[in-house]
Image (cartoon, rainbow, N blue to C red):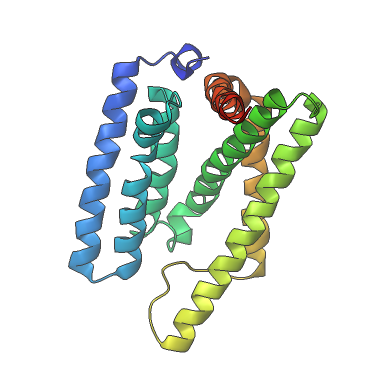
Amino acid sequence: MRVRERLGISDRRQRQLTRAMELSLIGIFFVGLDRGNLGIVINSAMAFAITHVPAILERDYQIPMDAGLTLWITTAVFLHAVGTLGPYQNDAWFWWWDHVTHVLSASLVAAVGYATVRAIDAHYDDVYLPPRFMFVFILMFVVAFGVIWEVIEFAVSGLASILGGRAVLTQYGLGDTMLDLMFDTAGGLITAIWGTAYLADVVGALTERLDGRRSKTD
């Protein structure tokens, strides 16, 4: 199911929004250079690189990535990069920014986990994953990934403190970590309840690739 069928936004408009955010990421990169802020530079560069992943998947692996899915991915990384400009540190005005980015990022992680496992389920005859299990799996997958991410943030922040540099990723304490995990779970719930319908084409393409590999080895 194409995302535009649910959102009511044309493919052309979705592509325009994606391009606008990609150009903005280039601008954010140069803002980071001007400020001498390594965190902004690295985060914006990584975000820009991720925006090209859908095109690579579609071109090299024939995995359909329509304009809506591409916009979904781009929005998540774009808002994260914007957050490094100041919203992440400005709790007075933008206390909600970190929560929004965690929900969006977690929904993408959940989508990747769901599409992969669902394709395996469809490919192997001796594997059967009931719908209820898939719902629980999506949530557990997101929470597990969120825990790993928080550990990485803690390690990067600690290493920066030891070396006397500025942390590319920052952790603000136990309370912040628990909130992050709660909003990660919310992102997983969104994908589990509403997002899986958008991934049918992706699941089908992944299943075909698995089927094709098995036929070559038989």
In this picture, residue 210 sits left or right of residue 165: right
Percent x, y of residue 75: 40, 38
Q: Residue at x 38, y 77 (%)?
A: 166
Q: Is residue 172 visible?
A: no
Residue 108, picture quadrant: top right
In this picture, residue 46 sits left or right of residue 116: left
Quadrant of image for the C terminus: top right
Q: Residue at x 34, y 17 (%)?
A: 11
In this view of the protein, which residue sits in the foreground, 205 or 42?
Answer: 205
Relative to 138, residue 194 above or below: above
Percent x, y of residue 52: 33, 40
Percent x, y of residue 198: 55, 21
Percent x, y of residue 16: 26, 26
Relative to 72, residue 103 above or below: below
In this view of the protein, which residue sits in the foreground, 172 or 17?
Answer: 17
Residue 44, picture quadrant: bottom left
Residue 187, picture quadrant: top right
In this view of the protein, which residue sits in the foreground, 139 or 32?
Answer: 139
Relative to 153, residue 102 above or below: above
| Residue lying farthest to the front in this orientation | 218
Q: Is residue 16 visible?
A: yes
